[in-house]
Image (cartoon, rainbow, N blue to C red):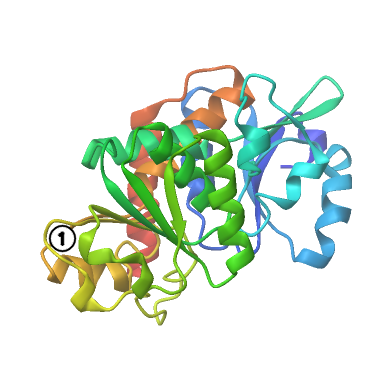
Amino acid sequence: MSRDSGGSIYGVLGYPVKHSLSPAMHNAAFSSLKINARYNLFEVPPEELIRFLHSLDEKGIRGLNITVPYKERVLEYVQLDSESFYLRQVKAVNTIVKRQDRWIGFNTDIPGVLRHLKEHVDPKDKKIAILGAGGAARAVAYATAYAGAHSIALFDIDAAKAEGVCAMIQSLFPGFAITRAGDIDGLDIRSKDILVNATPVGLKKEDPALVRPDLLHKDLFVYDLIYNPEKTALLQLAERAGAKISNGLGMLLYQGMLSFRIWTQTDAPEQVMRQALKEELKKCQSH
């Protein structure tokens, strides 16, 4: 859709984004509600990000989802939603919208991940291990601390980023028990109730599981935010260990529904979007 066609343009900005199922979900929703709009993939390498962000108006773009690796970098280009009091501390935006002459940033990952997680296990009083310290990990840490988790242990190869997440949680939830592990063994997964993979490791079929099989156990819920492939190496290992598992498809749906509402001021058609995701995932797996 060009700007001249009169429809609004939305999309997902990231690098890479070829694996994204978001276009299928949002375009099905636009079609179902007869909204004249299109949702595209915007795969923009880091060196072109600033130029792309400065050209949004020119391209006729009205709103974007922001994904890896730009959830934090986009912060300096948008005004944060004043009602999302936690956004400035969480320092991760996954949805932006043009309102009047300003770009406003939101985080729909936080309510999206919390709703999906609670369908499987209530984080309240649970001991949680998180792999990663990027925008998605920040959302998971905030959501679970907010929901009353017992404690969080977090590991990222970038120790400074991991420390940043811990500092954020401690400033927002004084006294909350969050620690940075020096390595994956330091997460003490055997004693945990929930393990979350919030890294991109697993997006490629050949990616290894980040966790040794002997650390996984039947009382663990393993939640991988990756949804394509449907079962990462980590989820396969966890399933073999008897753990309860879930990929991130539900989080994608719920954060997408919230983004849709922000962009269109219209309630998202949940069943239409859910079905579109399932069909698109099936297509990806048959290739």
In the image, what residue type sits under mark 1? Ala
Q: Nearer the viewer, residue 285 or 262?
A: 262
Count up the numbered dots.
1
Image-based side of 194 in relation to 184, left or right? left
Q: Which residue is mark 1?
A: 243
Location of residue 47 in the rendering, given as x and y in whole percent from the top left corner = 83, 66
Location of residue 149 in the rendering, given as x and y in whole percent from the top left corner = 33, 40
Placement of 186 over or under 146, stated as above or below = below
Image-based side of 18 in relation to 154, left or right? right
Location of residue 213 in the rendering, given as x and y in whole percent from the top left corner = 22, 77
Q: Nearer the viewer, residue 269 or 259?
A: 259
Placement of 104 over or under 74, stated as above or below = above
Q: Residue 270 lies in what quarter of the image?
A: top left
Which residue is at a point 45% across and 56% down the rendered structure image?
179
Q: Could you tell me which quadrant the C terminus lies in?
A: bottom left
Secondary structure under the numbered disc 1 in the rendered image? loop
Whether residue 95 is visible: no
Q: Nearer the viewer, residue 146 or 42?
A: 146
Crowding around mark 1 (Cα neighbors within 10 Å: few <14, some 14 to 19, many 20+) is some
Placement of 46 over or under 263, stated as above or below = below
Which residue is at a point 36% across and 32% down the rendered structure image?
147
Q: Residue 78 lies in what quarter of the image?
A: top right
Placement of 267 over or under 154, stated as above or below = above
Location of residue 19 in the rendering, given as x and y in whole percent from the top left corner = 51, 62
Whether residue 156 is visible: yes
Which residue is at a point 19% across and 77% down the rendered structure image?
214
